[in-house]
Image (cartoon, rainbow, N blue to C red):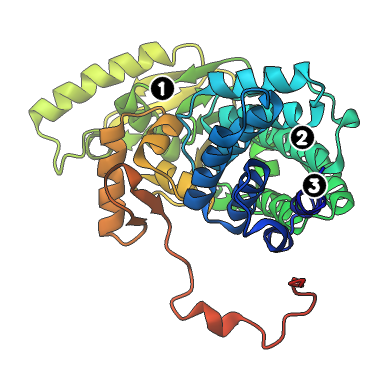
């Protein structure tokens, strides 16, 4: 192999894109184009990176099957980083099969992890879990072992298996240190911070407080009747009733749960479920209909009884009623939660991840932009949405005067 190409590849594997560019920045042969593309991706210029990798794929000859397959994997990784989630999964799967057939198991495993991470990002946790079951991290290099453990932690976090997630992150931190890739260590620490951040508000008879993921896991495993505002479900120890497609019924269930053990007035229920300023006769009639539907839907876990003032919730098998709400009740919280990862998203990718229509997501983004909670750049299909940076002053003022251990630009 060309010594400069080999040196650039080693630098990229170690997470040092500047050193890699120093070797191949002025070359236009296919391997150099591919390495330049990967280096630009590591530096954050995803548009330029995508163009370079595509140029490399076109420049490789018909006999360079493995090289072209690696370019497909690199392009898929760039698409994942830029949150272009609708890229063709079949092309990545074909590239993975080619790499496996020719003995490149490391890049083949990398391709499979990309697909698993995409499945996890768009909410297909079960599919991600099944795909992960066929991979053995013991035979992988440290960097991919860390990726494996990050995926394990991500699945466990979404399943609210917090102890499993913490154990996976310990293994990921160890593998990242062994790989000696700073960006990978930063990613592991970023995921670790999620476990120490309040993830919900617990509303109960005793009051309201923020809770960590471990406490959420404990609440869901308890004998209480839980109204889960994140998943739009009502559950006890035996049964889970999903109200994700019935927002009016869920609003009523939550209002009754927050009022428990007291009843909720008809005026409060009308305002909560129908967003009406006053409860006239038509609204009261509609409330009676929806309460009847709620009573039938929740019959296995709770009953809803009429009182002089309104209605009351009575759990069948539980002695406590708890509401788990989002840390902050604000419109379009799900969109903000996705944008909080710091990446730039297209509206189509957000719609895919949320399982919603693109027009609904666009309206939410426009409302958030009007409130200055998100910002956009680009035009047309190239428009991307991000959350604005937290500091309200020049970030250069945060930089130290000297940077210890900075990157060395070799000559």
Real-space CA distance between mark 1 and mark 2, rounded to the nearest whole angstrom = 34 Å
The residue carrying pointer 3 sits among few (fewer than 14), some (14 to 19) or many (20 or more) residues within 10 Å by Cα, namely few
> The C terminus appears in which quarter of the rendering?
bottom right
Does residue 133 appear in this view? no
Q: Quadrant of residue 214?
A: top right
Does residue 65 appear in this view? yes
Q: Quadrant of residue 238?
A: top right
Q: Are marks 3 and 1 in contact (CB under 8 Å)?
A: no
362 in relation to 389, above or below: above
Of pointers 3 and 2, the one earlier in the residue sequence: 3
- Decide if residue 232 is on the left or right side of residue 135: left
Query: Which label lies toward us, 1 or 2?
Result: 2
Looking at the picture, tell me which residue is in the foreground, 122 or 71: 71
At horizontal 56% and vertical 56% (from top left) the residue drawn is: 44
At horizontal 41% and vertical 22% (from top left) the residue drawn is: 243
Per the image, the residue denoted by label 3 is: 2
Secondary structure, mark 1, is: loop
The residue carrying pointer 1 sits among few (fewer than 14), some (14 to 19) or many (20 or more) residues within 10 Å by Cα, namely many
Per the image, the residue denoted by label 2 is: 148
Of pointers 1 and 2, the one earlier in the residue sequence: 2
184 in relation to 359, above or below: below
The single residue placed furthest to the bottom in the displayed view is 401
């Amino acid at each position: 192999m060309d010594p400069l190409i080999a040196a650039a590849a080693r630098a990229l594997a170690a997470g040092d894109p500047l050193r890699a560019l120093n070797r191949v920045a002025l070359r236009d042969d296919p391997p150099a184009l591919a390495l330049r593309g990967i280096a630009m991706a590591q530096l954050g210029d995803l548009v330029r990176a995508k163009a370079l990798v595509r140029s490399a794929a076109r420049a490789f000859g018909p006999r360079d099957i493995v090289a072209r397959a690696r370019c497909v994997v690199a392009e898929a990784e760039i698409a994942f980083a830029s949150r272009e989630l609708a890229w063709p999964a079949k092309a990545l799967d074909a590239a993975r099969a080619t790499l496996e057939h020719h003995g490149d198991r490391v890049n083949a495993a990398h391709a499979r992890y990309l697909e698993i991470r995409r499945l996890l990002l768009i909410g297909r946790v079960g599919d991600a879990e099944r795909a992960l079951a066929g991979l053995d991290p013991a035979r992988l290099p440290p960097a991919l072992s860390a990726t494996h453990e990050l995926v394990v932690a991500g699945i466990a976090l979404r399943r609210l298996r917090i102890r499993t997630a913490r154990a996976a992150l310990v293994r990921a931190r160890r593998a990242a240190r062994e790989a000696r890739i700073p960006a990978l260590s930063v990613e592991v620490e970023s995921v670790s911070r999620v476990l120490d951040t309040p993830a919900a508000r617990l509303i109960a008879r005793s009051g309201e407080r923020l809770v960590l993921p471990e406490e959420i896991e404990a609440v869901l495993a308890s004998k209480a009747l839980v109204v889960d505002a994140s998943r739009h479900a009502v559950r006890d120890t035996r049964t889970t009733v999903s109200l994700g497609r019935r927002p009016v019924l869920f609003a009523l269930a939550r209002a009754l749960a927050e009022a428990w053990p007291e009843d909720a007035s008809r005026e409060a229920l009308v305002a909560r479920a129908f967003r009406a300023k006053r409860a006239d006769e038509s609204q009261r009639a509609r409330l009676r209909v929806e309460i009847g539907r709620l009573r039938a839907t929740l019959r296995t876990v709770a009953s809803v009884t009429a009182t002089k003032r309104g209605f009351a919730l009575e759990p069948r098998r539980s002695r406590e009623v708890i509401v788990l709400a989002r840390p902050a009740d604000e419109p379009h919280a799900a969109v903000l939660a996705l944008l909080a990862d710091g990446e730039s998203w297209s509206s189509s990718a957000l719609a895919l991840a949320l399982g919603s229509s693109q027009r609904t997501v666009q309206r939410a983004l426009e409302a958030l932009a009007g409130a200055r909670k998100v910002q956009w750049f680009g035009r047309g299909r190239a428009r991307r949405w991000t959350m604005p940076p937290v500091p309200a002053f020049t970030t250069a003022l945060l930089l130290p005067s000297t940077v210890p251990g900075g990157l060395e630009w070799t000559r």
